Image (cartoon, grey):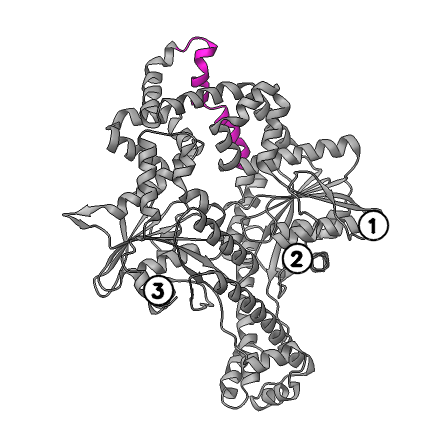
Amino acid sequence: MAGRLSDVPRLDPDAMLGDLGVRIIVCCGSGGVGKTTTSAALALRAAEQGRKVVVLTIDPARRLAQSMGLTELDNLPRRVAGVDHSRGGTLDAMMLDMKRTFDEIVESHADPVKSGQILGNPFYQALSSSFAGTQEYMAMEKLGQLHAEALRSGRWDLIIVDTPPSRSALDFLDAPDRLASFLDGRLIRLLLAPAKGPIRLFSAGMTVVTNTVAKVLGGQMLRDLQTFVAAIDTLFGGFRARADKTYQVLKDSQTAFLVVASPDSDALREAAFFVERLAADGMPLAGLLLNRVATSAASSISAKAALAGAEKLDADNVLTSALLRLHAERLARVSRERALRRRFAAAHPAVPTATVAALATDVHDLGSLREIGELMAA
Amino acid sequence: MSDSASDQQGVRLHIVTGKGGTGKTTVSAAMALALAYGGKRVLLCEVEGRQGIASLFDVAPLPYEERRVAVGSDGGEVLALAIDVEAALLEYLDMFYRLGRAGKALDRFGVIDFATTVAPGVRDVLLTGKVFEATRRLDDGVPTYDAVVLDAPPTGRIGHFLNVNTEVAGIAKVGPIKSQASSIMRLLESDRTRVHICSTLEEMPVQETLDAISQLGEIGLTVGTVIVNMARPSELSAEDLAAVTNDELDVALVAAGLKEAGINADEAAVAGLVLVGRQHAERVGLEAEQRSLLEASARAVVSLSYIAEGIDLGGLYDLAEDLRESGEF
């Protein structure tokens, strides 16, 4: 029968981390499934197994960030203290500052006067701080930079990337292209056109457009817009080319995508979309990592027996009755999760899967990251 | 929280935010149902294109149109609207500038796309603008809706989203967008609007809730109720919780209980049950810690029942009942 959990191939995280041919691991999945924790736990484990690792996190919980020494937002990788270096590995970590990453691209591609104009423009400020997709784009950009530095200096042999906490896991793949095509878009080209030559073809429509924009938004806004567009003109080709280049790196066999999910229907649905999309784009999938999987510690007692027993004991042994109820509830959760996992496995039987048992407490020190690593590999 | 019930008198617009995954949409829907009690007419809006309301009420995806999604036995009703930013812009242009055809031309040139994605704050002005319009809409001089509930963006973006005035100030110092933003801001700042924050009793959602409380306060908005979702009551008594945490649980009592209940359990099974109890106690402890953080900062904290099986329409009515009983809605 399709979708039996015992038939699901096992994902071996240690084999992935130990494969020197794997130089980039991308952890993706929908928001709230524990991607950041997974990235950090994998990075720590790889470093303690001898890899020279840098982990790029996007939006870590405060205490997790602190545990990795990420107290400063300076957009630079920092050495993580407290890592076991006995096997020759190292761990660097950084938190993505998307605005700063964007500013740096502008500064490195335009002369000081022009970059000053761009950085001060309200449209640029909106684009670099709140455009849906900028975070994904900048995560990819940063990945490209780290990859180039790894090749150049040999400082790292493994880059682990956490992806932004989007609603959809697909955003990570789609957003950079959306931003690039936006910057490459028709309106922008039209607004640039006066400086660039004949636009007679569009001029009637264009007048409607500029008049309307001026009417609704005011003339100042239109002027700002034109300044912005003219100023970032020089960057256009660059944006597109860089996005394409990073995309190629992601398709390469040195990359492994790890889809992270929690065992609930929304997260698994997103995971399924993502798995299908990776296959369609020819991107290398390492497997599915399921976080916070419920386990039962007293599996010899069935849920039915536990509930019947709890009822019987309600009056005179409330302790045992409460424990039995908790146990029955846990078993119900285990079986709900198994049903969801079977459904996923039926549609995607070849996806190797690893599970991480749920911990009772939050993860915010290297010790518990290590514990997560152990659970992954168990 | 003494006069909380009367606080809600006259509140017309209820904005619900919270960290992603805390059940914002569920809480918004339950709130709309609660407010519809007593024959009231309530509009429930979403702005993020997720069609969360449709899937919650088990109806087809919502168009840009107010549709009835639930009725109460007492004649109350909940209508829902998925606000689409592009449709809102075209509607706005048409309403204020009679730009039916030109609107389409704008679309062809990518202006709609531009205005709704990158023009700073324009997107949010359009989304909140539609909510503003619905809140103030009159039918024969009577408000169309007794209340409007907005399933708003998550805590990470709520400050930007609601601070429409400042957001557009960079691009429009005068003009129609600016005056629209100012009218919206007046409603948001008034005592007819409350921002409610949804949280679970976990570290990150609570931290984000506390951050949002201070952020919203700074921009002059009134935080209403913090709604604790998915918190489960402790199964164990305080004594047993302490005992299991200190590893002093009466294991013999558990073994005897199992025997009495006719459950054949070996030592491992008993130890397994005790472990389940210890994990439960750890969670209860963490939750209590997080709850006291919320109570120290929030004007009012309301807890919703824990629904183990996941939320269906029946569960939604149960949550609505919880909200009503709190006296806050």
**Quadrant of the image occupied by residue B73:** bottom left
Q: Is residue A82 magenta?
A: no
Q: Position of residue A43 (x, y in %)?
A: 72, 48
Q: Please report the residue visible at 57 percent of the width from the left and 50 percent of the height from the top.
A: A348
In the rendered image, which residue does mark 1 sit on? A85
At numbered mark 2, what does the secondary structure look like: helix, strand or loop?
A: loop
Q: Position of residue B14 (x, y in %)?
A: 34, 54
Tell me the CA gap for discs 2 and 1.
Answer: 21 Å
State the quadrant of the C terminus of chain A. Answer: bottom right
Q: Please report the residue visible at 63 percent of the width from the left and 81 percent of the height from the top.
A: B243
What is the span of residues highlighted in magenta in the rendered image? A174-199
Q: Position of residue B101 (x, y in %)?
A: 27, 25
The number of callouts visible is 3
Determine the residue located farthest toward the left in the rendered image. Answer: B140
Q: On the same chain: label 3 and label 1?
A: no
Tell me the CA gap for discs 3 and 1.
Answer: 57 Å
At numbered mark 3, what does the secondary structure look like: helix, strand or loop?
A: helix
Q: Circles 3 and 1: CB distance less than 8 Å?
A: no
Tag 1 subunit: A
In the rendered image, which residue does mark 2 sit on? A364
Q: Which amino acid type is marked by label 1?
A: His
Tag 3 subunit: B
Q: Earlier in the sequence, mark 2 or mark 1?
A: 1
Q: Is residue A62 above or below residue B106?
A: below
Q: Is residue B317 above or below residue A196?
A: below
Q: Which amino acid type is marked by label 2?
A: His
Q: Callout 3: few (<14), some (14-19), or many (20+) C-alpha neighbours within 10 Å?
A: some
At numbered mark 1, what does the secondary structure look like: helix, strand or loop?
A: loop
For the residue pair B165 and B39, the one nearer the viewer reads as B165
Which of labels 2 and 3 is toward the front?
3
In the rendered image, which residue does mark 3 sit on? B4
Q: Which amino acid type is marked by label 3?
A: Ser
